[in-house]
Amino acid sequence: MTKQIILAAHFPGVNNTTVWTDPAAGSQIEFSSFVHLARTAERGLFDFFFLAEGLRLREQRGEIYDLDVVGRPDTVTVLAAIAAVTERLGLAGTLNATFHEPYELARQLASLDHLSGGRAAWNVVTTPNAFTGENFRRGGFLSYADRYTRAAEFIAASRTLWDSWSAEDLVVDGDSFARTPAPGAFAFHGTQFDISGHFTVPRSPQRHPVIIQAGDSPAGRDFAAASADAIFSRHSTLEAGQAFYRDVKGRLAAYGRTPDSLKILPAVSYVLGDTDAEAQEKAHHIRRQQVTPQTAIRHLEQLWNRDLSSFDPEGPLPPFDPDVSGESIAQGRTRLFDDPVATARAWRSLAEEKGLGIRDLIIEVTGRQSFIGTPAAVAESVDAFVQQDAADGFILVPHLTPAGLDDFVDRVVPLLQERGVFRTAYPSGGSTLRSLLGLPPTSPASVASFLGGGPA
């Protein structure tokens, strides 16, 4: 059976995937930029709009790293505003399960679901570092291994709150606001959270907002299999995507779930041209804008864990190994390399084999999955990845804000519609994001199984 493709639009903000210095780039923080990208995605009949979040400006060598995640307004505030200027587009926000609290976040997401008519989604992320925790009351108290335990309990607590109102509790045309004398009663007792009382927000249209999760470790895959409706992944080839797809979908049965209950949505970029050669030339130019000489050195420092500012970005890699004895030179991001020495030696071998300097080597090793070619070729590739079970759809990451999605909607979406693999209109009536994605009702039991120590 031909699969229907899921499409989402990512608003990345300033970082090393966005070419924010391009003359065609607009503001990264003015509301008009968010409106343009969201309305373009809705014009293209996309499933949802996706926002990232940064809780502290990243630092490197003790200085703010202003080319990596700077200037992101508050996620829920932006999504609530976008809800007012769109009608059918889902609204997904990245919100941290390490530093927020379930009662606070469950209220915000349930409120967004009400305000948007059932379009809210939560991309659950965790943070193990104390650097980010310094901005919060609890501080950086979590170990790397414990972060998923807290996140799973956070989701379970949030679902308890969302379930605290029944569909019959709210009366909109009677003499009272609530049918029952004490609606929203809840109690959740766990190792991370011990809360009870009455939830203030009546049941929202989706009951539970769509849960998205990103993570590639075995623990992250189990967490997604137990708790998520969609997983935000990153794989560079069809074969790697198929292996990930098989692995994650294969974990679902252990949590009492079916393959359709979790959608796999890699983040991808794209470049279009009238010919393949033109597209390749544009892609080469974009990559050199993304990986500036400064960015190349900064990225190399994250592996070597040393100050490499004296190195020529176009010259050879350092002849010595990374420093693995001290604290990380980069603050505010998750660990990038499990074995820095082995990775550095592999990069050095690759550079020598291909005759690459530092900047070209970084371009080579940091490239994300990207569809490059004519609109017809890109449409064919997108469809092939989905039909051959390397993905259920994609979260598109345009390199330009806010107009970077325009040509995909105008030139690729119609070709996907001609293939019969993408909708030609939103469903009639008041469908929610959950129904738009073809997701079944949520299963709190799977979260309980994860908290119990693993698959049932």
Image (cartoon, rainbow, N blue to C red):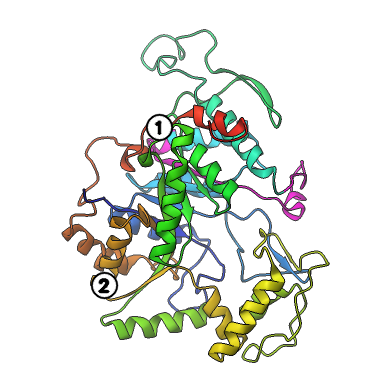
**Above or below — where is 50 with respect to 366?**
above
Q: Residue at image x 73%, y 86%?
A: 319
Instruction: Name the spot of residue 85 as percent of width and height, x first.
Output: 37, 48
Give whichever of 170, 222 is nearer the camera: 222
Name the side, left or right, on which 338 lies relative to 51.
right
Classify mark 1: helix, strand or loop.
Answer: loop
**Above or below — where is 90 with respect to 206?**
below
Q: Which of disc 1 and disc 2 is earlier in sequence?
A: 1
Q: Residue at image x 20%, y 58%?
A: 417
Instruction: Name the spot of residue 150 as percent of width and height, x first.
Output: 66, 38
Are circles 2 and 1 on residues that touch, CB within 8 Å?
no
Q: Residues within 10 Å of mark 1 (few under 14, many from 20)?
A: many
Question: Can the viewer see residue 293 in this picture?
Answer: no
Does the magenta-highlighted stretch encompass residue 135? yes
Q: How many marks?
A: 2
Q: Nearer the viewer, mark 2 or mark 1?
A: 2
Instruction: Name the spot of residue 380 as percent of width and height, x first.
Output: 25, 67
Name the side, left or right, on which 436 lies relative to 341.
left
In space, the residues marked 2 and 1 are separated at their CA atoms by 37 Å
> In the picture, residue 437 is in which quadrant?
top left
- Residue at mark 2: 377
Amino acid residing under circle 1: Gln
> In the picture, residue 260 is in which quadrant?
top left
- Residue at mark 1: 206
Amino acid residing under circle 2: Ala
Q: Residue at image x 48%, y 69%?
A: 368
Classify mark 2: helix, strand or loop.
Answer: helix
Instruction: Name the spot of residue 385 as percent of width and height, x first.
Output: 33, 61
**Residue at the extreme right of the image, as rendered:** 326
What is the span of residues highlighted in magenta in the rendered image? 114-143
Q: Residues within 10 Å of mark 2 (few under 14, many from 20)?
A: some
